[in-house]
Image (cartoon, helix red, strand yellow):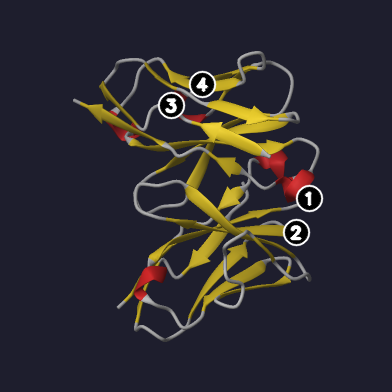
Amino acid sequence: GAVVSQHPSRVICKSGTSVKIECRSLDFQATTMFWYRQFPKQSLMLMATSNEGSKATYEQGVEKDKFLINHASLTLSTLTVTSAHPEDSSFYICSATGTGGYLYGYTFGSGTRLTVV
Amino acid sequence: AQSVTQLDSQVPVFEEAPVELRCNYSSSVSVYLFWYVQYPNQGLQLLLKYLSGSTLVKGINGFEAEFNKSQTSFHLRKPSVHISDTAEYFCAVTPNSGGSNYKLTFGKGTLLTVNP
């Protein structure tokens, strides 16, 4: 089945630094990738949608200059949290889908736990 | 726009008992429906999905769900749960017309706790 690899699984960084999270589709071409943020014991909040080769579309209230998304190839999308602060600490999850991805129910990465100290 | 309501935030049950996790949705267009399971500190795993056809959908790990269009519901059921089913369960929908890149709208989740 479709596999999405997300790295790192955990990262701790100092306040003010930037962190990059990678999301790779291993066995299919991901035409669309979604980035979510999940707070403890809460649902997933969609941050942005990215299509390969295009600029990401951010959801209302998500700072595009703070959360940089790049989807340069059909197998890789990255989320960079710039100038991270403690309030950015959260669980970030990516999801990838190919053409007609709804047929497969979308494939999620295993998530990245970001802690900003 | 779509919205998903999971009526129970927590459902405690005993091992080998049946369970039903409720999901209702609201949408002005037809939708596809999904149930996902999330174990602690992990991503989401698809349990089952409804795209079209038979309204009773069978998924992995013995779960099934029934789509009821008139009641706009998609409840998840399992006849006999195991300790290993303890996890967070999310119901999600997406428009079936491709609107918004098929992005998913999630419910708030239901924590299923199976006790011995």
- Contact check, label 1 and label 2, Cβ < 8 Å: yes
> Dot 1 corresponds to which residue?
A99
Amino acid type, mark 1: Thr
Q: Is residue A29 visible?
A: no
Q: Mark 2 lies on which chain?
A: A
Quadrant housing residue B92: top right
Q: Mark 4 lies on which chain?
A: B
Amino acid type, mark 2: Thr
Q: Report x, y in % for residue B8.
A: 38, 27
Between residue A25 and residue B38, name the one nearer to us: B38
Between residue B63 and residue B98, name the one nearer to us: B98
Q: In this view, does A61 lie above or below B78?
A: below
C-alpha gap between disc 1 and disc 4: 28 Å
> Dot 3 corresponds to which residue?
B7
Circle 4 SS class:
strand
Amino acid type, mark 3: Leu
Between residue A72 and residue B83, name the one nearer to us: A72
> Dot 4 corresponds to which residue?
B75
